[in-house]
Amino acid sequence: MLPNAQLKGWQKRWFSVDEAGVMNYYSDPMQESFRRAQKDEPILLTKVTTITSNNISSTHFELNLGDKTLELRAPEKDQAVFKTILACFAKLKEIGAITCEIQVAM
């Protein structure tokens, strides 16, 4: 590890996804704009190449965007929330809002 390097831990974020496959996230659940804290641009789920999870017990999953990967996790490792998130992605795929593969190792 480099001197003075800090490891970043999980930061709690809230997400909204619309039927067009646009995902906004924000750091405060009371924030009105539903925009990213760092940049004022949404994540276009149409750019996601794969959604993967190889660690279901931790409710960890990745959105692979080609040039970067977003690592996400359900709050408090809640399995019910994790299953709901996966069901939302499956529904978005069903209606054509996303076209990527969803790869979850059960």
Image (cartoon, rainbow, N blue to C red):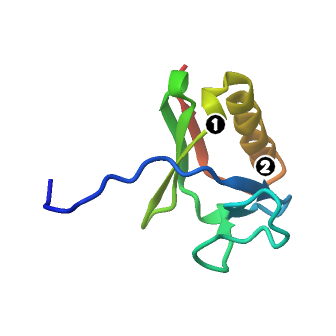
Q: Quadrant of the C terminus?
A: top right
Say which amino acid is labelled 1: Ala
- Name the element at disc 2: helix
Say left or right for 17 vs 102: right
Say left or right for 24 vs 67: right
Q: Is residue 105 visible?
A: no
Say which amino acid is labelled 2: Leu
Which residue is nearer to you in this view: 37 or 87?
37
Reply above or below: 105 against 43.
Answer: above
Reply above or below: 62 against 59.
Answer: below
Given this view, does label 2 or label 1 mark the residue nearer the observer?
A: 1
The picture quadrant where one finds residue 41 is: bottom right
Where is mark 2, residue-wise?
A: 92
Q: Is residue 18 visible?
A: yes
Residue drawn at 78 percent across, 56 percent down? 29
Residue drawn at 72 percent across, 53 percent down? 14
Residue drawn at 43 percent across, 48 percent down? 9
Say left or right for 30 vs 72: right
- Name the element at disc 1: loop
Earlier sequence position, callout 2 versus callout 1: 1
Where is mark 1, residue-wise?
A: 74
**C-alpha separation, residue under disc 2 versus residue under disc 1:** 18 Å
